[in-house]
Amino acid sequence: MSTITAGNGIDVDQLVGTIEAIKDDPALGAFTFRARSTWASGTHNVGHIAGFTHAGNEDQSRVAPFVLEGDEPPVLLGSNNGPNAVELLLQALAFCYAVGYVANAAAQGIEIERMEYEVEGDLDVRPFLGLDGPRPGFTSIRAKGRVFSPNATSEQLQELCQYVQDSSPVRDCLANPVPIETTLEVL
């Protein structure tokens, strides 16, 4: 099978090289990502995403942190300075699906001219507010993708969609329990 140099904005040669390198040395697949949130006021927080660790080494590729504003809508006591945390979670799933889809399509020689995901989730805030209700998280999440490819069959695109779901790190985190350890340093 010949390699496509670039497809869908993905350097397929680099993708194949990364896969081969991780096959040869599985430790290269290990990452530790980090995010930091600082309370501003009310329900408004400012998030910073900067470096991460790859295979035991701190990545130096980012010259400045990504800054995200998080808040709540007025109905939940906020000022709409940014999306709320559960909206960011839904966006993370949409990002993960889209990245996985276009990268894997490129690896298969499938051109993508248009790709989008809409993700929505149902949540009842009663437990968050200290009231009886269902679990505090989403009770259901629905993702709908739309794709246009000039050179792939509907069957190929559907198979790729299933592969992306099966290999999505964000979907896996949502669908399977992940141990979370929380500590608090009192200043």
Image (cartoon, helix red, strand yellow):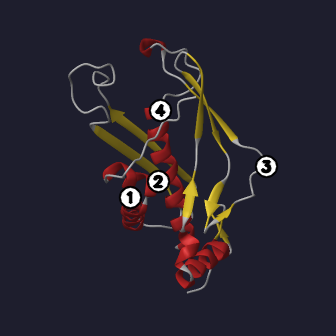
Residue type for callout 2:
Tyr
Q: Nearer the viewer, mark 4 or mark 1?
A: 4
**Residue designated by label 4:** 85
Q: Earlier in the sequence, mark 2 or mark 4?
A: 4
Q: Earlier in the sequence, mark 1 or mark 2?
A: 2
For the C terminus, the quadrant is top right
Residue type for callout 1:
Gln
Q: Secondary structure at mark 3?
A: loop
Q: Earlier in the sequence, mark 4 or mark 1?
A: 4
Q: CA distance from mark 3 to mark 4?
A: 25 Å
The residue that appears at 41% across and 40% down in the rendered structure is: 119
Q: Nearer the viewer, mark 2 or mark 4?
A: 4
Q: CA distance from mark 4 to mark 1?
A: 22 Å
Q: Secondary structure at mark 4?
A: helix
Q: Secondary structure at mark 1?
A: helix
For the N terminus, the quadrant is bottom right
The answer to whether mark 2 and mark 4 are in CB contact below 8 A is no
The answer to whether mark 1 and mark 2 are in CB contact below 8 A is yes
Q: As rendered, which of 139 and 35 lies closer to the eye? A: 35
Q: CA distance from mark 2 to mark 4?
A: 19 Å
**Residue designated by label 1:** 165
Q: CA distance from mark 1 to mark 3?
A: 32 Å
Residue type for callout 3:
Val
**Residue designated by label 3:** 63
Q: Earlier in the sequence, mark 1 or mark 3?
A: 3
Q: Earlier in the sequence, mark 2 or mark 3?
A: 3
Residue type for callout 4:
Ala
Q: Nearer the viewer, mark 1 or mark 3?
A: 3
